[in-house]
Amino acid sequence: MDQGRYTIQEIASIIAADSEHLANDTSIIHTLCYDSRKISNPAHALFFALSGQRDGHQYIRDAYQQGIRHFVVKKDLFHKPFADQAKAFPQASFLQVNEPLQALQDLAAYHRKQFRYPIIAITGSNGKTIVKEWLYQLLSPDYRIIRSPKSYNSQLGVPLSLWQLDAQYNLAIIEAGISKTGEMAAIEAMVKPTIGIFTNLGPAHDEGFASQTVKAAEKWSLFKESELVVYSPSCVPQSIRIPGKRKFAWQWYTADTHHHNADLNVVEVLKLNDHTTQLKAFFQDKPIQLTIPFIDQASIENSISCWALLLALGYQTPTIAPRFQRLFPVNMRLTLKKGIHNCSVIDDSYSNDLSSLAIALDFLKQQQQHPNKTLILSDIPTEENDERGVYTRVASLLQDKHVNQLIGVGKALKRHADLFPHDAQFFETTEQLLQILPQLTLANQTILIKGARSFGFERVSNRLTLQTHETTLEINLNALEQNLNAYKRLLNKDTKLMVMVKAFSYGSGSFEIANLLQFNQVDYLTVAYVDEGITLRNHGIQLPIVVMSPGIDTFEQLIHYGLEPEIYSFPELQALIKLLAGLDRKAYPIHIKVDTGMHRLGFEPDKLDGLVEMLKQSPTVKVASVFSHLAASGDRRHDTFTKEQIQLFDTFASGLRDSLQYDFIRHLANTAAIVRFPEAQFDMVRLGIGLYGINETEDQSLLLQPVARLKTGITQIKSVKSEDTIGYNRKGKLPNGGKIATVKIGYADGYNRRFGNGVGHMMVNGQLAPIVGDICMDMCMLDITDIDAVEGDEVWVMGPEIPIEQLAKAIGTIPYEILTGISQRVRRIYYYE
Ligand SMILES: *Cc1c(COP(=O)(O)O)cnc(C)c1O
């Protein structure tokens, strides 16, 4: 994140760092960073070695190699052996502090104090990002606003947001979220909000707090010195005294009551049509109303929060009414889709500013599937006098993030075309780009579409992506990353991590998932068959890949693509050795599978001697790892058996090591065993289903996030009478008559036929609708008699609201089968929020 401008000496004094050799250092710092994979502007960057999942100090070398010369590190790390290591970075300056995160926060607090303009801080359980974005939309006509990028609201996100404060703005909107006790004090000290908004109070993050009241009290402490606080009394438990000099309460009365004791009392919410709602209220005892372009409960609540703030600031209805009518839904997602001509398309056409551009470019950089990367970029809304500076920064970002080609849209970009490489192309309007688009031959590359809302880049995205037949599987990459980290936290410091991406990553995707795992530096990937491995290699995956069932006839390809075979039998081993000898290859990595009780693939433990003999005579292969698979690691009733398997494996691996006299990786634990048998981590674990958010063990403390949502749409709605029958074999009936919706998903999409006739449900506009009649090949019918729905409405088939575990149980199978059964014709869409 870019903005502040301090000399390194100033910073050293602000964060009270011990720093030798800074006397002659006149470097200016603009950029703060903490992740060596997301570096830009290295000459003016300061790297904070934070300790999180992994210790940031491990990445100093990587950051140094990318040109960073200034580091904030933990003091005690400068004792040996780090002091010696530091010599490896002769040009670096190290600012030593007690706690690098604290130093980052101190620097942000100091920077914030340089500005006198108001800061609006938003906290609450839900809706923070939406309220922030809507306030930005509503207040932009009157203010030059800086706001937190995306949902940067954490201990780390807030300081990075504050760092962007600058004299060119005159209002800041900052989001603040906490997940456990004690975090708000640090945020309060940094932000010192002038105005506070408390959106609502729900159960999110309850587990980090002793009680709801403790959580509320902590959140309220953010506003202890604020001038104005806007809230609904429902966010205020009894015992809490509301802080702030001035308070403005709003209340939404769902029942008829005559005590209107808030400042803004919303008494009637009228749905005008499918997309508009009218709010009627009393403000200072006078009737007042507002129309908003939304109909759902959450949007209504968030709109009222915004309305209340604008009224508290003295805005009059004639000014704000048209602004509210122009509000648009917030979509902070970065979406990865399949494009035409074998492209991958990343769609981020909601907003455009430097910080969200940097985030999107990091995601682009993470994509390895095509060497060529193109950015389609619109003008960035800026004040005219700092236009040059902004586009200079854009140009250097494009270089830092390895963008090969720029297509610019807008007059301002065109004015500054000289800042960009010669082959960049510029268009004044989106229409002009759309006209030329077919001639641009965008093929076999990854394209990032990043545009301010007014440029309507969704039209560009529609042209460049393959149209889906509406049934899509959405994969939440944030959730996937969180699950990965939840399991990493269970591992011992040196335990390696192999991730199972067989069967299309349990149905969720191929290189898209592997890219993310590669970016997160897991140690190995594993597929079932050679062709799965080849696909990953062809899409830029360089991690070691193990193939579990290679098949002798595929060995040549396996070797050609640098894949590593599981070896489970003598004939297989012999065939490989013979082939490698013919190719004159030495020490090819192999993975020995032992059968300790699963009785599927693998050498029986008593074959150890024969195996040793063959391996010793064959310099063509080298054992990279030895492993076995547990048959029932998730089931307490079989724990004695599991422990026997662990023992057998241990003995076999030791025997092999003693005989071969070299070291290899030993691994046994699958997902359930990572949780249930921490003593069986050996040197590596194999994570499977847990990554995708499914934990079927009794220990639910991991807080996994559902990763997938299967969505479809309503094609047709019709009324049926009591005597009518619905679907094949006339199985479906609504005894009292009613309304049915036909939706675009059937058993050919992987929606099991056993869900028919009321066994399964789907969610339509927040309500569960049972399946009526038999499931057809490409569609099925829902009973929506009591549900408000229109043709074209979205329908959720599985996901956070309809858990895969529940669906599996309903038809007597396991989540693995449900997930991997979703057919390939269902388009996968990947997103970051
Ligand atoms: C699939 C598989 C795993 C992962 O199992 P989960 O139960 O999904 O964690 C681990 N090891 C082997 C050999 C596998 O085939």
Image: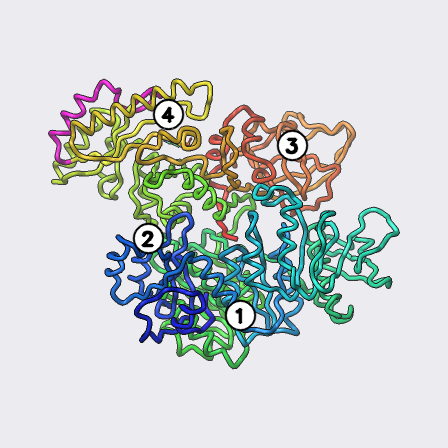
Rounded to the nearest angstrom, the CA distance separating label 1 from label 2 is: 30 Å
**Circle 1 or circle 4, nearest the eye:** 1
Query: Which residue is at the front of the view, 109 or 722?
Result: 109
Find disc 1 in the rendering and name its residue: 165
Compared to residue 701, the image places residue 162 above or below, namely below
**Residue numbers of the magenta segment:** 595-620
Q: Return the residue at label 4.
A: 630
What is the C-alpha distance between the residues marked 3 and 4? 38 Å
- Residue 197 among magenta residues: no
Q: Does residue 446 appear in the picture of this structure?
A: no
**Pointer 1 local density, CA inside 10 Å: few below 14, some 14–19, many at least 20:** many
Q: What residue type is labelled 1?
A: Leu
Question: Dot 2: what SS?
Answer: helix
Percent position of residue 65, x then y:
28, 61
Name the element at disc 4. Answer: loop
Q: What residue type is labelled 4?
A: Leu
